[in-house]
Image: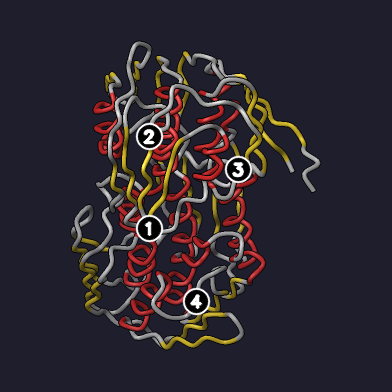
């Protein structure tokens, strides 16, 4: 098990390239199960969640070749429709194989994602969509068992906008007989690129990029290629790193339209930002960080995956800020660790109340999840002295060698083994 050792207080400078989006890749990869051909996904990030998804598809019989961010998948030899617990337990996104397997093979046995109960939880939106399309769903010994003699088009409405459920329903519907409509569909960029990938395969989809999707089912799909989008959360994380250290940096391979909510809040805090095609320049060398309130929301609102990083940033503001998470009400495990670094934060229900301090001081802190880990690294970069961030395996799930990117910008950060256990 590794840790990061950070000697804070270093100004960042230079240019760094943004990796392909993890979350979109986790939908694009299982989408290849809808055909029996060769598929290519360019700009795929080399992070642990991607390797987990590749292992899952390989376990189903797919042949994978992953080199230099190019992932090639041949799904001509699928021999199993069972997604076992040992793969699914590592990440909730593994449930994305449910829709494609059910649509293509009429059967899917997928382990329930870890920590997810049967009932009114987000996973239920996936299952209800499959039922609407004509599948029978049973729960046996911790597995979802879905069966169908042929999916049929249906009207699907989500009471709650869900990226995962929208993606699963979309992938199932493209091979269903007849027309399917999905209302209150998620409009995140990860869904838009998934829909475009499916169209490249031969799917018939209208309304891409809107909350109402209409899908005319086809009998079969062909192999396809697609260029993955930049990771908007990595982009936001590195922008906040530059802002917290009052630095001037440039990010390459950015889609600024995907991060407009983040850019708006950064500018309100005092940051200077220039967008030039796929380059984004951030200048915070001479700013006084203003306190800026944030409420997370579904896209195009401020992303919940940036909530922890924003709290860390506001900890150094000259004022106060309230950060409310309307997506995940209990996503504040990073707050006690930030307090160890000297932050002044109080949490009530689903809101964090932050009173800015002049400086943070290095300490030993522990990661609890992916984005919490990122916020602790950012705090360590800005803090005086040395910060040790333990359990960084969380970070490796979603950030491609973030320490190397930060080091290329001048950060004093090192990955070292730890004898924590």
Which residue extends farthest top? 286
Pick whichever, 310 or 55, lies toward us.
310
Residue 335 x, y percent position in the rendering: 49, 44
| Residue 339 as seen in the image, left or right of residue 119 | right
Of the image marks 2 and 4, the number of the one nearer the N terminus: 4
The disc, 1 or 4, on the residue closer to the chain's N-terminal end is: 4
**Which of marks 2 and 1 precedes in the sequence?**
1
Which residue is identified by label 4? Answer: 117
Q: In this orientation, which residue lies closer to the viewer: 10 or 151?
A: 10
**SS for dot 4:** loop
Residue 124, compared with residue 413, is above or below; it is below
The residues bearing labels 1 and 2 have C-alpha atoms spaced at a distance of 17 Å
Q: Is residue 230 visible?
A: no
Q: Earlier in the sequence, mark 2 or mark 3?
A: 2
Q: Nearer the viewer, mark 2 or mark 3?
A: 2
Q: Earlier in the sequence, mark 3 or mark 1?
A: 1
Residue 396, numbered label: 3
Secondary structure category for the residue under label 3: helix
Q: Is residue 279 above or below residue 105?
A: above
Q: Which residue is drawn at the image coordinates 69% and 36% (left, top)?
A: 3
Q: Is mark 3 in CB contact (under 8 Å) with mark 4?
A: no
């Amino acid at each position: 098990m590794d840790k990061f050792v950070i000697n804070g207080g270093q100004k960042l400078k230079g240019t760094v390239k943004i990796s392909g989006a993890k979350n979109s890749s986790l939908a694009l990869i299982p989408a290849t199960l809808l055909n029996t051909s060769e598929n290519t996904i360019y700009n795929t990030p080399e992070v642990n969640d991607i390797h987990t998804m590749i292992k899952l598809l390989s376990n189903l019989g797919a042949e994978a070749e992953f080199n230099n961010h190019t992932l090639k998948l041949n799904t001509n030899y699928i021999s199993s429709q069972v997604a076992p617990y040992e793969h699914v337990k590592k990440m909730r996104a593994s449930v994305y194989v449910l829709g494609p397997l059910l649509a293509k093979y009429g059967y899917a046995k997928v382990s329930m994602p870890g920590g997810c109960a049967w009932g009114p939880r987000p996973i239920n939106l996936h299952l209800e969509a499959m039922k609407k399309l004509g599948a029978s769903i049973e729960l046996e010994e911790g597995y979802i068992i879905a069966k169908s003699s042929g999916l049929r088009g249906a009207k699907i409405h989500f009471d709650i906008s869900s990226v995962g459920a929208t993606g699963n329903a979309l992938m199932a519907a493209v091979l269903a007989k007849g027309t399917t409509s999905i209302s209150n569909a998620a409009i995140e960029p990860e869904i838009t690129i998934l829909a475009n990938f499916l169209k490249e395969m031969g799917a018939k989809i209208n309304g891409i990029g809107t909350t109402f999707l209409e899908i005319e089912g086809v009998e079969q799909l062909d192999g396809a290629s697609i260029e993955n989008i930049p990771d908007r959360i990595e982009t936001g994380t590195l922008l906040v790193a530059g802002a917290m250290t009052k630095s001037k940096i440039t990010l390459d391979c950015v889609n600024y339209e995907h991060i407009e909510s983040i850019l708006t809040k950064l500018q309100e805090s005092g940051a200077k930002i220039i967008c030039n095609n796929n380059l984004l320049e951030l200048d915070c060398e001479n700013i006084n960080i203003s306190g800026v309130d944030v409420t997370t929301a579904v896209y195009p609102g401020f992303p919940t995956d940036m909530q922890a990083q924003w709290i860390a940033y506001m900890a150094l503001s000259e004022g106060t800020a309230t950060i409310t998470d309307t997506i995940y009400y209990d996503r504040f495990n990073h707050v006690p660790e930030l307090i160890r670094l000297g932050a002044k934060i109080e949490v009530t229900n689903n809101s964090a109340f932050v009173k800015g301090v002049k400086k943070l001081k290095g300490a030993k802190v522990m990661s609890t999840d992916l984005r919490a880990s990122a916020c602790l690294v950012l705090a360590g970069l800005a803090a005086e002295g040395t910060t040790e961030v333990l359990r960084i395996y969380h970070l490796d799930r979603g950030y491609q060698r973030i320490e190397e990117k930060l080091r290329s910008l001048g950060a004093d950060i090192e990955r070292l083994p730890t004898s924590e256990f």
